[in-house]
Image (cartoon, helix red, strand yellow):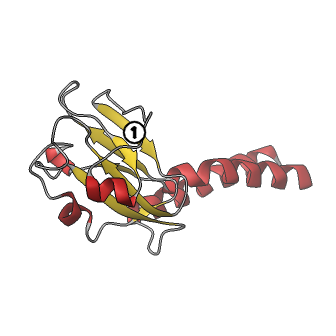
Amino acid sequence: MASTQFIFFAILAILAPSILAKEIKVGDDKGWTINFDYQAWAMGKEFVVGDKLVFIYPQGNHNVIKVDGSGFQQCVAPANTEPLTTGNDVINLTSPGQKWYICGVSKHCESGNQKLAITVAAESSSSPPSAVMGSVTLLAIISIIMMMMV
């Protein structure tokens, strides 16, 4: 019985964070582009460790560069920074705190306002209903499997 409980908690520990994590498409339907207010877009959204930011844009037209607060304000990327350039760039939010991203193409950051600043929380203050339902479903499936093992 003890080994069954260990298996249960091991599976739960592995799967729970991925169920609660969200994929957040930056800019929603607009994607990653110029002349869009990303600060207004981010306002009211909750970003949590484990979430993924997805930057969608036509490959070759833009890029994504992680910068610090100064780089964000000045629209300057740190030396030797490799931009993300696939047009479907995914950034895992692995730590809490301020995060800043800019487009380094031409004057897209300076003139086109193509930059995003967010605050990532350590954990969610409110679980979205779909994440809760996913957790309940997972727990139910694991419970059934455990009963079958006994």
Viewer-proximal residue among 112 and 94: 112
| Residue 107 % position (x, y) | 15, 41
- Of helix, strand and loop, which one carries label 1? strand
> From what the image shows, is residue 13 above or below residue 80?
below
Residue 1 seen by the camera = no
Lateral position of residue 73 relative to residue 100, left or right: left
Residue 124 seen by the camera = yes
Image-quadrant location for residue 135: bottom right
Q: Which quadrant of the rendered structure holds the N terminus?
A: bottom right
Farthest residue to the bottom: give it: 125
| Residue 148 % position (x, y) | 75, 45
- Residue at 43% over, 43% down: 91
Image-quadrant location for residue 100: bottom left
- Residue at 36% over, 32% down: 84
> From what the image shows, is residue 96 above or below residue 3?
below
Quick one: label 1, few (<14), some, or many (20+) residues within 10 Å?
A: some
| Residue 68 % position (x, y) | 41, 55
Count the marks. Answer: 1
Q: Amino acid at mark 1?
A: Val
- Residue at 41% over, 31% down: 82
Lateral position of residue 93 relative to residue 6, left or right: left
> From what the image shows, is residue 150 above or below residue 121?
above
Q: Which residue is mark 1?
A: 90
Viewer-proximal residue among 150 and 51: 51
- Residue at 57% over, 54% down: 17
| Residue 106 % position (x, y) | 17, 35
